Image (cartoon, rainbow, N blue to C red):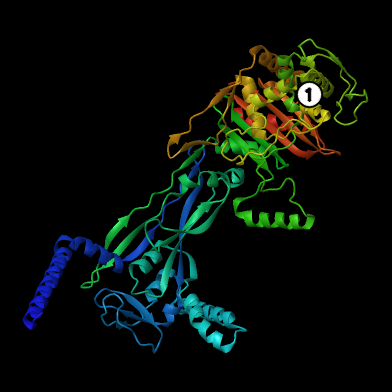
Amino acid sequence: MSYRGRLLLLAILGGLSGTVLLFRLFAMQVTGGGEARVAAERKIADGRPLHARRGRILDARGNELAAEEVGYELAVRTAAWRAVMHECPRCGLVRFYAAGEKARPCTRCKATLAQVDRADVAPLARLLGISVQELVERVEERVAEAQGSVERGLKDLPPRQAAQERKRLETDHGWRPRRIARDVSYEVAREVELNPHANPAFRIRAQHTRRATGGRYFVHLLGHVRQEQKEVPGAEGLFVDAAVGVSGVELAFEEALSGEPGWIRILRDPRDGEAQVVERHPPRHGLDVTLTIAAADQALAVAALGGVAGAFVVIDAHQGGVLAAASAPDYEPGDYARVLGEITEEKERRGRWPKHHALRESALADFDVPGSIVKPMTAIAALLSGAAAPETRIFCDRFFRNRRGQPLQTLRCSHEHGEVDLREALVRSCNVYFQTVQKASIEQGRFDSFFEVSRRFGFGLPTGVELEPDPFPDTYDPGRTWEQNVTMAIGQGRVRLSPAQVARAYAGLFTGALPRLHLVAEVGGRPVSPQRTPLRIDERALRFVRDALEDVARKGTAAGFGLERWPAAVKTGTAQLGGKLQNAWLAGYLPVHAGRPAIAFAMVVFDTELNGADACAPRLAEFLRGFYGERGA
């Protein structure tokens, strides 16, 4: 190619390159100018997280049981206090350099940074209510504290490694905010936040704490939260401190309560220093959760237990809402760390966790041997399978005999009842009667009927209440031996039930339908819909057992404790644990009374020498007096 041809080719290529460049510039400045400006602003704008308020937990009457409380504390970054502040005159970027260190050009716009003298701390000291000297002394204490942390980190390191590690440690400890005043006023927080150039070394840290106003009455139900640092969704590099539920309702409804933090980006005008929000993503605050329990009723249930190790559950027999759920022993929410430490120490000393400790939620999510309160269900199974009829009479001399006719010394009756029929056996709680009926049921191949009826009453199945463990444990299965299956008839052997399961079963016995239990009535104003499952059991069998239970408080095992003042149907139970200690139970139901809904209930006192009536009946009577606001019908 000739010399002229080469020049022509170069000219064409140059013209094409210029055309492309001009087109790109046009696209950037005209058609895509807005996007480019937004992208540039994002790079230089300061991002700040916006805290999402955690939802409240309310009782059935709208009283706060747990709510977020915001406090402020003043902190200082010791490196910024000791360093010299420089500011970019164009974009407002602030950088700190150690004394004698040369300031580098602005990393955003390459302009020369200008030194800024440290501002006067007198206004801040005045708002804090202390002297300037005291404020400076507090800061210098933190400076010494940070330097001490650096020196301890360098201790025992070789000289070369110590020199390399020093810079990292000084950066880490020097720029970490250190508290100099807690619970400062909003005026102090506003002064520091709105005048960062006047207070360059200081920072305000908002403390979002969870205030448990429900106290010890609700400590097992509400649970606990811990503070965690969470990344703000959609805002790279931004984090926010947030409360996270670790147990109870706080954990069960974590997603609804927690919400989602937001964020903003603020851009400073390089001409006049005025700041403006260039991007905003508002937070989504957590939803309020309303319980089915009124605080006054919960206090009555806790008082009824009187501090003994036990549990007490009261439910709406038709709707399934939990009206009270007390577990004892309890503790004040602020004592959680101390109580946990004591329990852990005891566990290390004994090699196992203590059986009934203050952190144990026994009412809704714990399981134990139920004893004779399962006898009404055994009676219904016997009636339905034909293993017994209302007129079937069995002689009780206190001892049940095994296949070889030998009397069993364990699980014997408390009294020699003589010859009793099915109704008398329920009213007087005769172990021999129900063990004998169960023995006949097994021998006649009708044990499946007993197990099926027990399942219909919810034994061994989840109640639906929000605090139950997941997965649900195996707590009600056929025994491995003949003796185990026989003893299931009186609530011994391979039987473990929670007070919530027992209360639910008695609600089903009373209404003919098993309600799904729920502790929460509303989430974010949306009510929880009640659910009921029909028992599909012959009404005559249910009516027979109901009539018998109404006599228990008048002339049976629960007579003489004042329960006959209310139209209550109850059943006592004493679960033998071996030795002198036993679990004392009382369960039952009451129809609509004194403006209150029909209720079902279950109470247990753990590890006592008393029987179910002596341990529980006086406590139930005390609760009913307060619950109905009267001394009986």
Residue at x 70%, y 24% (from the top left corner)? 570
Residue 607: horizontal and vertical position, in percent?
78, 40
* Figure quadrant of the N terminus: bottom left
Q: State how many labels appear.
A: 1
Q: Give percent across and percent down for residue 344.
A: 71, 56
Pick the quarter of the image with the C terminus: top right
At horizontal 11% and vertical 77% (from top left) the residue drawn is 10
Q: Is residue 138 visible?
A: no
Q: Residues within 10 Å of mark 1 (few under 14, many from 20)?
A: many
User: Which of 385 and 109 lies nearest the eye of the viewer?
Assistant: 385
* Residue 241 in the figure: left or right of residue 270: right
> Which image quadrant is residue 532 in?
top right
Q: Can you give x and y, in whole percent of width and height, for residue 572 in the image?
A: 75, 27
Q: Relative to residue 448, is residue 9 depicted above or below?
A: below
Taking the image as drawn, is residue 200 in sight?
Answer: yes
What residue is disc 1 on?
A: 557
